[in-house]
Image (cartoon, rainbow, N blue to C red):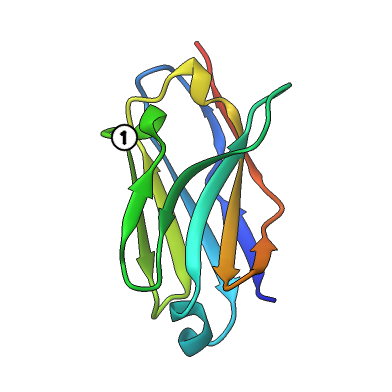
Amino acid sequence: QVQLAESGGGLVEPGGSLSLSCAASASTIIFSSYDMGWYRQAPGKESELVAVITSGGTINYADSVKGRFSISRDNAKMTVYLQMNSLKPEDTAVYYCNAQWFAIHSWGQGTRVTVSS
């Protein structure tokens, strides 16, 4: 498994932007072979997939964030990013970074995002 550390969460007003980062402790070869994703869990709700970028660069988003969020990765820096724009109160959640290699999942500790005026 790979160790993951998220950063960049915080409090933002509706309509604002935040950028999350997830740094992995792995070699570049190993990191580049992982599919990387962002999940979130809002209070009282189940965890949901927000965005994923595969090792081959294929990207998918949850319908709720399409057009507002953007996922990217820098394999040389072993980091995955989530740029969040036009944030809404319903985006409030703890955001978790996930690394998947076949059936093996690794998770970060989460970073809290609060969208409120």
Q: Where is residue 52 in the image (x, y as percent from the top left)?
A: 43, 54
Instruction: Give the side of residue 96 with respect to residue 79, left or right.
Output: right
Q: Where is residue 14 in the image (x, y as percent from the top left)?
A: 41, 17
**Residue at 50% across / 26% down in the picture?**
91
Would you place residue 62 above or below residue 43 in this image? below
Q: Label 1: how many residues lie within 10 Å, few (<14), some (14-19) or many (20+)?
A: few
Most distant residue in the left direction: 67
Q: Position of residue 20 (x, y in %)?
A: 48, 48
Instruction: Give the side of residue 39 with respect to residue 81, left or right.
Output: right
Quadrant in which the N terminus appears: bottom right
**Residue at 56% across / 25% down in the picture?**
92
Figure label count: 1
Residue 19 picture quarter: top left
Instruction: Give the side of residue 89 with respect to residue 54, left or right.
Output: right
Residue 11 picture quarter: top right
Most distant residue in the front direction: 103
Q: Describe the element under mark 1 as helix, strand or loop.
A: loop
Most distant residue in the top direction: 117
Q: Where is residue 23 in the image (x, y as percent from the top left)?
A: 55, 66
**Residue at 31% across / 62% down in the picture?**
58
**Residue at 35% across / 20% down in the picture?**
15
Q: Say which of 112 and 35 sits in front.
A: 35
Would you place residue 75 above or below residue 91 in this image? below
Three-letter amino acid code of the residue under disc 1: Lys
Residue 3 picture quarter: bottom right
Residue occupied by mark 1: 66
